[in-house]
Amino acid sequence: MAERNISQTRLFERLTGDEDNRLCDDIPEQACSEQPHNFFLHLWASLGNKLADELSSARLVLPWLMGIIGAPIWMVGLLVPIRESGALLPQVFVAGFIRLKPKRKGVWVAGAVLQALAALILAVLALTGRGSLGGAGVLIVLILLSLARGLSSIASKDVMGKTIAKRRRGTLMGWSGSVAGGATLAAGGVLMLLGDRPGNTALAVLLSVAALSWLLNAFCAARIKEVPGAVDGGENAWGSVKLGLSLLKKDRTFLHFNVARALLLSSALALPYIALLGQQQSGSELSGLGLLVVVSGLAGMVASPIWGKLADQSSRRVMHNAAIGTVACCLLGASFAWLPGTWTQSVWPYAVVYALLVIVHHGVRLGRKTYIVDMASQDDRALYVALSNTLTGVLMLLVGGVIGGLAQWLGSAALLLLLALTAVGAILSAQKLPEVEQQS
């Protein structure tokens, strides 16, 4: 056991680039010696979560499920908004509840188990669901899955803030992103092997594996050694809302961060439209989508550890540089749609831009996640994360609808130019944010 702990500590030091694993910032002293143990549990938990996310994707797997069971097309259009906003919107309402608990990993575990249960029900619906009733069942279960995802999201970030020291959190999330990229790569390979119309049984198997992956996430979260934290300031749901809104007024850095985060949504919103351009220009269907999933996985594996290291030095600079990359990718993707030549009729140019934008988007996610965790104190971290995510959820519903309408009117290429302009605003906003990694 002692030799295993020594090996684990050495690997931890190699991954973090730090030979003094007792050096701690912003976490309880008792948690310092447990960092190597907790670091790898966070990594394994991330593997389970990300693999499950890919195998139950609201952009790929669940639309196929709806098509196979014969659900109405308008139901398919509700999948992504429910998945994304359902995970973000309610978080401020549960933040006060989480703050009342000295140990928060139990909430994380509960969220993961609920997601596993939802995935199993979806697997059953893949085998038995039919028509509108089956489609309605998928949407109802997706609401449960999304709400549970929100529970796990806020609790996992809070647990990370208590168990992993400042200037190591970005590295952890970077390696987690790399692991997630490998999971995405595997998922893309599976999807390509399934063919154009995977059967009910194949989808049921995929969703069952997703359920097992979330159980892995729950198992690892339960084994994390978390030191009890402060419970002062716990609020009920509406008290959390009032307190959160007051923070926006009092904490100008938090307000400014949320403005920058809102403008950085352009990186996420641009991804499906670049993929759509590739499909429109090349005429390929599943093979093109499979290629995009594979390059997405490769890009995540390469980019995330690098962004994580940079985020530990300056998460503000990572957000700023990622915004610059978003502008470049949006302009490049739009230009391909307008350039003459047979080479633009292939999915490959768009796959390259898609991969580059995935790299940039990992920078956006790692930068803003590291920034908010490092900016907030231990007592307020859960509320800061929850309020920021809830605000983002509202924006995703509003902006997503507007963007969809504009895409129908302007076309995908022109919309990318608009998103590039939004990313310019993100550059200016992130440039003005204060540094938080150097603050003690």
Image (cartoon, rainbow, N blue to C red):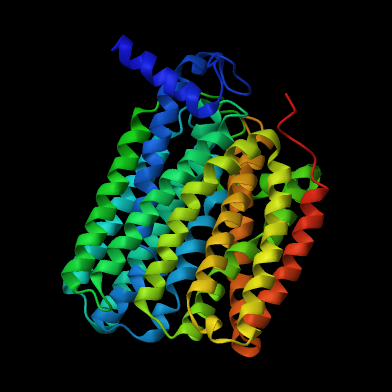
Q: Position of residue 118 (x, y in %)?
A: 30, 58
The image quadrant where one finds the C terminus is top right
Q: Is residue 396 above or below residue 29?
A: below
Outermost residue, bottom direction?
409
The image quadrant where one finds the N terminus is top left
State the residue at coordinates (48%, 80%).
346
Q: Is residue 87 above or below residue 138?
A: above
Viewer-nearest residue: 152 or 19: 19
229 relative to 417 in the view: left or right: left
Q: Position of residue 307 (x, y in %)?
A: 60, 43
State the residue at coordinates (42%, 71%).
79
Q: Is residue 132 above or below residue 82?
A: below
Q: Position of residue 112 (x, y in %)?
A: 35, 46
Viewer-nearest residue: 241 or 341: 341
Whether residue 100 is visible to the viewer of this picture, yes or no, is no
415 relative to 10 in the view: left or right: right
Q: Position of residue 392 (x, y in %)?
A: 62, 58
Whether residue 282 is visible to the viewer of this picture, yes or no, is yes
State the residue at coordinates (62%, 40%).
370
Toward which corner of the image does residue 169 lie, by quadrant?
top right
Viewer-nearest residue: 46 or 163: 46
Toward which corner of the image does residue 134 lie, by quadrant?
bottom left
208 relative to 29 in the view: left or right: left
State the residue at coordinates (47%, 81%).
279
292 relative to 315 in the view: left or right: left
Toward which corner of the image does residue 361 lie, by quadrant?
bottom right
